[in-house]
Image: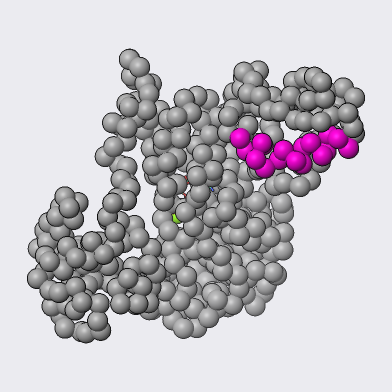
Amino acid sequence: MENEELWQHVLSEVELSVSKASFNTWFQHTNIQTKQDGVVFISVPNSFAKEWLENKFFKFILKSIRSVAVDIKDVKFVISSVAQNAAVATAAKQKKKKEEEREIPLDNQLDFTGIDAETNLNTKYTFDDFVVGSANELAHAAAISVTKNLGTVYNPLFLYGGVGLGKTHLIQAIGNEVLRLYKGKKVKYVSSEKFTNELIAAIQSREMDKFKEEYRQNDVLIIDDVQFLAGKDKTQEEFFHTFNSLYEKNKQIIISSDRPPKAIPTLEDRLQSRFEGGMIADIGYPDYETRLVILQNKLIKKQISLPEEIIEFIANNFQKNIRELEGALNKVIVHMKISKGSFGVEEVKKILYPSIQTPKKNINIKQVIQMVANFYGVNEKQLIIKTRKQEIVKPRQVIMYLLREEFKFSYPSIGSKIGGRDHTTVMHACEKISRQLKEDESLNEEINLIKKIVHNG
Ligand code: ADP
Ligand code: MG
């Protein structure tokens, strides 16, 4: 069998067993370079693809090849500059195509930001551009499933996760995909803040009927960052009615939040139970592989190549927020373009140093507790036991706040170290301190001082 035919056979089998995004990411620009002494050499565009294919697809590929070419004993992957160039060329073509598409005046509903005035959706958020990894696999699968079973299987779909982890991207991708798949479906995306503002405006201008109709006629309603409805009774009330009206008609509702429904303070019970009546999926921190692929994809799109050790450095140092990960990459690219001399990891370190969340490996929870206790002149044991004395409660809340905001420990782990408290207690403490910090100048100074002490050991 000819090399090309053989490889087409393998690809057709792979395609059936992996997602489209994964197929595009790992198998584009792969080829059989040559066959020699029973070994097939497969050319791949870079070492990421090489490693990934070796680890995850070696057996599959070998088996697939052997099913049509029994004399083959082994498969080897080689990085080839031809494949690399092909990758860059395709990216260039795609970019050009997109630019040409943009010139068609039909798009005049889109302003320069790519946001559709009617649906509020940003066209840049697609499933194709969403990298799937262990942290978002479930959320992604649920999102895909929703596009195929509108209003029926997962209603509502409730996605939650920390800042910059892809909630908005994923829920907007659902909206964009629905518009692509079905003609004439009405989709509306709105942040809960916008929903609140529109509601207030409608009340003031006595246009509630219009507001109601506007929201209740959708086939898909997407509400982002629903945690901001906390404490807004009137808005929650209206949202509850909107929700019910859509739900009864089997219209799809999609919701995002930075935390699960249970942990949203002052969310009405009836809304909470509505949210919990559908599918709840969380998005966690992206693993290293995912971070690498996200960076790689960005570079391919921008047609820029960076040394692998720089890409790895960025992936290693921005672990908890994909927006920051992308921001770091952009920063490096800008500096690289204007730099005259050599440009390596050392330069990158200098550029990114201020924004790197320095891994404070050598500090543990216990040490932080000790230092804050010392600062407030209380004893460590007092902090752990149950008491509502203000002179104890405040340092305890400050500790929780610092452990979370400064050291990025998880809510449950903080709770368990501080007297086995529930993670919602920790969340409340952090919120309380955050709120006070906005108003209380002296608390600000206090906490800055504590941070200095803690960081200097
Ligand atoms: P959130 O709404 O959770 O704060 P966003 O959806 O705004 O986060 O994501 C922040 C940035 O990271 C966006 O530019 C988004 O496109 C990107 N991003 C997040 N997750 C992914 C992913 N899995 N693959 C590719 N890009 C992602
Ligand atoms: Mg968001």
Identify which residue, 390 or 259, lies in the foreground.
390
What is the x, y in percent for residue 6? 85, 29
Q: Please state the total of marks drawn on the protein image.
A: 0
Q: Is residue 57 one of those drawn in magenta?
A: yes
Would residue 228 be found to the left or right of residue 8 on screen?
left
The structure's colour scheme is: one colour
| Viewer-proximal residue among 375 and 205 | 375
- The stretch in magenta equals 51-67
Residue 24 horizontal side relative to residue 420, left or right: right
From this view, report whether residue 278 is shown above or below residue 348.
below
Ligand 2 is found in the corner quadrant, namely bottom left
Residue at screen point 65% across, 58% down: 141
Q: Is residue 16 above or below residue 383?
A: above
Can you see residue 204?
no
Q: What residue do we see at 17% from left, 62% from top?
A: 371
Could you tell me if residue 44 is visible in this image? yes
